[in-house]
Image (cartoon, helix red, strand yellow):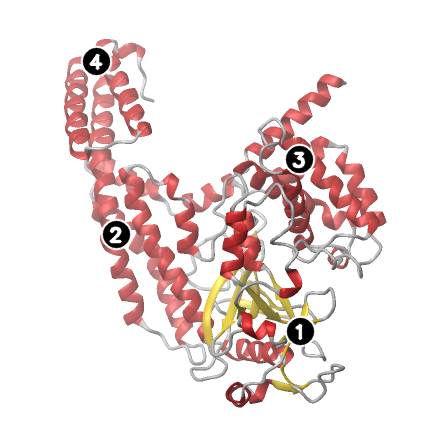
Amino acid sequence: MAQADLSVVAQLRKTILNIGLFPRGCRGFRDGLEKLDHLFTSSYAKQGKEILKLVAEHLDQHVFNSASNYFDNEAPFQLDEAFCSGSFSEGTMRMNLNKKLLSDTDFMFVLKNIKVTEEDQKKGKLTVKEDTPFVTLFLTDDALIKTWADFLETSTQPGYENNVILSSMKLKEKLRQRYLSYGPMFTPLAEEDVDIVDEGPSIAVVSSLPEKGKVPGLPEWIVPTEYFDFVLAIKCEGWPLCAQEWPNRSRCWPTQDIVHKIIKDGFHIVCKSSVKGTFRLSFSNAERILVGNLTDLQHKVYRALKAFVHHYKHQWSPNIKNIFCSYHLKTIVLWYCEKSGPRGWSENTVVIHLLSLIDDLIMALRERTLPMYFMPKYNLLEHMEDGNDVADKIMELRWDIGQISDGIISEEPDKEAAFNVLKSMELDKVYQKCLEKGRFETNDFIEHFNERLNSMNEFWMDTVGRLPSRPRNDVVGNRSLSASQEPMMKLFTDTCEIINILAIPVKQAYDFEKENKIEQAREIYSNMLVELNNWEMKRQTLTSVEKQALKDIRDFIQGKILFPQNYKWF
């Protein structure tokens, strides 16, 4: 029994360690790519990165341009910046192609023409409801009052009667109406469901493409249903006066340098619908930086916790959203990392840390107590439904290590499904065509991609052209395509070069071997060694991985020359 227990613990440890490392601490696609810079070490990878960088820059610009459509071109309701937050920025997003499901993608839209300064806080223009993250923004400047006249209310707060406040409800409703009138942000073909204005800070959107067969010309892509949360925010300088305990707290983590960076970068207040017109403090920027500074092992365990909970949560309760959410999990992780620090983390302790986090979740539910990380006097679970039944069910699973592993594995990205998406590009066809021709050329790949994607591109652009206020714009589309062609052509050219050195001669030599023409095969292998040497000299610098790969190939080819019967390519 003990041996079996050890084996399931070892399996859970392996499951956690196999979790991929996703970019974290990023505000956008380009930022996320920079977080993966350590992966782009070879000359080929660096060229590939240049292509990805262009794509990422286009995506970031697309996010801002698309978001701008929901705002006015003139003051006051204008967009200052748009960036990712939540699970995407923290590297904890879920992506399951088999289930056609992506986790929520959160975007924060920051308003132009208004900002809360540290001086505003000192003068009481940003007042906090005692020991809560809910705040009221008073406007006293005549110019601001005139600018935001359509979004103002009169305060009924004791001591502030008849003072002018900015209404978060009116701002949020404005964004929602603009979204409904303009249409989907990212996928013009999508069928969307937009929530009504409620007490939360976000506008929640469920976006899915029509089922295959309903859209003529659409290739057989696996397109997940997407969930977007759009949050309207106002930038605030410095740090909230009501959260001054956090920077001075005794802790094992994070370092003071990280604390100083967080304070320097400021915070936001976000719109929430309320008859009182209150905003809510948002520490999203601070949370992004903190999660970005977790160690790889800490981040893997964080992902494991979220995967475990997501897989089983609907078995625990049909109303799980009324009990706890992913923000509560993040809060538990931040408290845990602050108290434990990174020194006690190793590959041998990841299971202990995961189980400890599950224990913390169980305790929080039973005691209905989870202090907000930045404002510990505020209890995030004060108004939740009874969580004892859920806590009991989690406790049952907590002792079933095998089921914990199963839950994590089922929620992590499915590599086979991702492979099937790549397979749908049918690159094997162009590869076989080039083999038969006896040479790989860049244009063969370009023509293949153009033929594969052309029908979808045309249908997409035509559909975009039929949407209100969004005309088809071939100029912009062609400019984006041209910008990406040069580095893509270079990557294809270099890839074809090494394939021509290896793949074509190998096929020729293999054909000779089948006909028992060993000397002719040996001559081809000898020429391959010369070509590999020339290729290596041209590359000038190679990574350790490339050097090892070249060594293995040379050893194999030399073996083919000396003992062809002992070395099999296929």
Q: Position of residue 447 (x, y in %)?
A: 25, 52
Q: Is residue 334 above or below residue 105?
A: above
* Mark sitting earlier along the chain (1/3): 1
Q: Mark 4 against mark 1, which lies toward the viewer?
A: 1
Front position among marks 2 and 3: 3
Precedes in sequence: disc 4 or disc 1: 1
- Does 334 appear above or below 347? below
Q: What is the spatial separation of the Cα atoms under label 4 and label 3, in whole angstroms?
A: 54 Å
Element class at badge 2: helix
The residue labelled by disc 3 is 353
Q: Is residue 158 above or below residue 427?
A: below
Q: Which residue is mark 1?
A: 127
Q: Position of residue 480 (x, y in %)?
A: 30, 63
* Residue under label 4: 561
Give percent across and percent down for residue 352: 68, 31
Q: Earlier in the sequence, mark 4 or mark 2?
A: 2
Q: Looking at the image, is mark 2 or mark 1 earlier in the sequence?
A: 1
